[in-house]
Amino acid sequence: MEELTIKTSRSYAFWCFKTIKFWFPDKMTLNQNGISTVKRKSVILFWIKENEQIPYARIASVRHIRGMFWDSIILESSGGSNTLDVIGLRKRDAKTLAEKINAEIAMK
């Protein structure tokens, strides 16, 4: 599987007054090892970020929440301790992401 990286929409950040997301959009990356997310926490201290990773075998469910303008992807782990989420995705990006994650889970 080739690596796939999806970023949140800048229009979502603009319309929802999320300055940090406009300059540093959240990213969700799929690769052969699993799924990882990167979120920046501050505009001024831009090097402060949160990285999370989960292997495909530990994913319990994939929720694709469809909104009026933007979609969200929420991944729940089988341990139930933490969720990976990316909010404010373009509709086609969220659909592609959900399909690829479900396909990888089915193969494992």
Image (cartoon, helix red, strand yellow):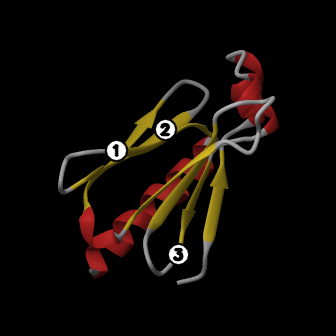
Residue name at image x 52 percent, y 84 percent: 1
Q: Secondary structure at mark 2?
A: strand
**Sequence-first tag of 1 and 2:** 2
Residue name at image x 71 percent, y 30 percent: 42
Q: Which residue is mark 3?
A: 31
Q: Position of residue 52 (x, y in %)?
A: 47, 55
Residue 95 left/right relative to 83: right
Q: Residues within 10 Å of mark 3 (few under 14, many from 20)?
A: some
Q: Is residue 103 above or below residue 25?
A: below
Q: Position of residue 8 (x, y in %)?
A: 66, 41
Q: Which residue is mark 1?
A: 83
Which of 52/98 is in front? 52
Between circles 1 and 2, the one closer to the viewer is 1
Residue name at image x 76 percent, y 40 percent: 24
In the rendered structure, which amino acid carries the disc numbered 2?
Ser
Q: Is residue 18 above or below residue 75?
A: above
Label 1, label 2: how far apart the Cα atoms are: 13 Å
Marks 3,2: beta carbons within 8 A: no
**Sequence-first tag of 3 and 2:** 3
Give the position of the C terminus as an image quadrant: bottom left
Between circles 3 and 2, the one closer to the viewer is 3
